Image (spheres, rainbow, N blue to C red):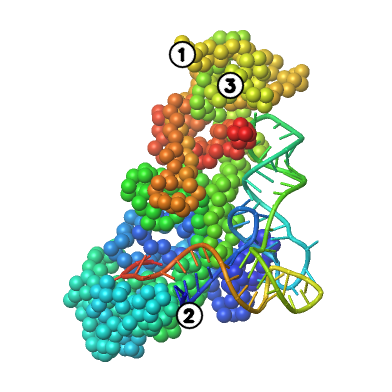
Amino acid sequence: MNDSSAEPSEDEPRDFIRDRIRADLESGKTSALVTRFPPEPNGYLHIGHAKSVCLNFGVVEEFGGVCNLRFDDTNPAREDEEYLHAIQEDVRWLGFDWGDNLFHASDYFEQLYAWACHLIEAGCAYVDDLSADEIREYRGTLTEPGRPSPYRDRTAEENLDLFARMRASEFEDGAKVLRAKIDMASGNINLRDPVLYRIIRAPHPRTGDAWCIYPNYDFAHGQSDAIEHVTHSICTLEFEDHRPLYDWLIENLPVPARPRQYEFGRLNLGHTVLSKRRLVKLVEDGHVAGWDDPRMPTLTGLRRRGVPPSAIRDFIGRLGVTKSDGLVEMSYFENTIREHLNSSAPRRMAVLDPIKLVIENYPEGTIEELDAANNPTDETAGTRKVSFGRELYVERDDFMEAPPKKFRRLAIGQEVRLRFAYFVTCTEVVKDSDGNIVELRCTYDPESRGGDSPDGRKVRGTIHWVSAAHALPAEVRLYDHLFAEEEPGKSGEWLDDLNPNSLEVRTGCLVEPALAENPGVVQFERTGYFCPDPDSRPDALLFNRTVSLRDSWAKDKGN
RNA sequence: UGGGGGAUCGUCUAAUGGUAGGACAGCGGACUCUGACUCCGCUAGUGAGGGUUCGAAUCCUUCUCCCCCAGCCA
């Protein structure tokens, strides 16, 4: 780890938060940088969380310091152990390490309780008997001040006693709460005597039934930061309004450190949703197959989809960190994924919608082993052998009976290259009784073995293929945007904007045999990037499309 | 008509009183054994009005629009 010498260099990211940290380090205000990533264990991490993860862990990689992983587990009614493990796996997958610094807000319950008592003794907090509805009523509105609760002026002794009895389980859920005594007339509603503790008689994943009162976010978060000596508590914009309360608590409590909160704009991505509430709904109502459905923007979904973590980190880095809230185009993310995969993914051939092609002048029963480059952009990726024979399968789309002028693929009388193999010319088509094309008959030029003709003759197009005798059957799942609308719910019910075609299952695909050996993320030549699904088996191959290749032909056709 | 925050190409962002720049998208072209990749070029922006200044995205001022807040969620 480097330490606080912080000359900004050219390729280092710069933003208002890093500028702040740099200044604090240089001035000596901060001697050792401490940040934290504080997920609530009540759902899976998504790409929006990745922005926070990359920021909090990123700055300590850049400036030195530590980033704690701290679970904000203050609400046992909503949280579950399942998420504790999943979240750690996802952060690790992204490539970050919290070392021994795995903490929980629940680790601090006893200290938090003591500090609550401190507040009571100082006359800064009181036990309120008002119901939730009454508290809401007394709180006023955005434009009208609130009114003090009739219980606001209880003595410290009484409050202490009541609070102890809350802890001792003498009251029902909702019967009493502990509130900070601040300002019922504040324009900032968070300062109108915010609730600090509530009664929740639910077993906690970590503390069991040791407690029946739990601190809420506002009381737990800042104080946990202080306990951990967090120097820069980085959160999203919606907490900006909470900062005065955050500071008020820090100032009124004998905490061991003075953390400061900084807020940045959260990530919004087009054609998807990134709110936990909505993601849960998609899973629970079965609109997707689960948290790890490859269409989900969750990290586990993206992982199953084949998106490399490096692409996610790179994407987040390109976005920058600001306080303006925007909507990032999905194509920006997709482009980053392609960029990472282009250099790393081995090329393979797979035919997603096969039609048979027979080379009439190719000797029957002959099989050739041809060399195919594994990655033309990376010579060190080497080559592999692919089997070639008289009967092949090619993509149905790669033939047209009445091709437009710019069509560079197979058509009657048109010569094309079979990738890594030979030049072939289509001579006739075979149709069934309904007039559907069922087979293409071709001739080949034996001189063009390997893909080039000695006479220097050029062909306009190159198409991919598989050998009929060697190809393996496979199922391929093509994914599209989960939502048809870029901003789901912009006009109407967000679920109505689901894309009915977000999943297209292709059965009867044929892939080259090399794909049987669990290849990781590969490029199917001319088609896209694909990875084997965890459910894929040797006798039932199953691939997910990570992202398609750019296709300027498809775009052109639309005109 | 309370409080907090934000407005720069279509999108994400740089420029902190001195030539409005980059990336993605789009368009055009070159190259190509992937209509991919790569390369080249083009299009396109300071929310509006006033002011200060030799000079304003930047400073002042008025206005407009957008986001967040009335959980015993985080």
Seen from the viewer's position, the closer of residues A423 and A6 is A423
**Residue type beneath disc 3:** Phe
Tell me which residue sits at (50%, 26%) in the image: A353
The chain identifier of the residue carrying mark 2 reads A
What is the crowding at mark 1: few (fewer than 14 residues within 10 Å), some, or many (at least 20)? few
**Residue type beneath disc 1:** Asp
Identify residue for label 2.
A258
Tell me which residue sits at (35%, 51%) in the image: A281
* Between discs 2 and 1, the one toward the N terminus: 2
Seen from the viewer's position, the closer of residues B64 and A466 is B64
* Between discs 2 and 3, the one toward the N terminus: 2
Identify residue for label 3.
A399
**Residue A456: which quarter of the image?**
top right
Tell me which residue sits at (24%, 74%) in the image: A131
Q: Are marks 2 and 1 on the same chain?
A: yes
Q: Quadrant of the C terminus of chain A?
A: top right
Can residue A53 be seen in the rendering of this structure?
yes
* Between discs 1 and 3, the one toward the N terminus: 3
**Residue type beneath disc 2:** Arg
Viewed as shown, does residue B6 lie left or right of A221?
right
What is the crowding at mark 2: few (fewer than 14 residues within 10 Å), some, or many (at least 20)? some
Seen from the viewer's position, the closer of residues A336 and B71 is B71
Q: Which mark is residue A409?
A: none
Where residue A364 sits: x, y (%)? 56, 9
Q: Are marks 1 and 3 on the same chain?
A: yes
Q: CA distance from mark 2 to mark 1?
A: 79 Å
Assess whether mark 1 and mark 2 are in contact (beta carbons under 8 angstroms).
Answer: no
Task: Classify mark 2: helix, strand or loop.
Answer: loop
Seen from the viewer's position, the closer of residues A181 and A393 is A181
Identify residue for label 1.
A434
Where residue A337 sits: x, y (%)? 56, 46
Query: Is A238 placed above or below A338 here?
Result: below
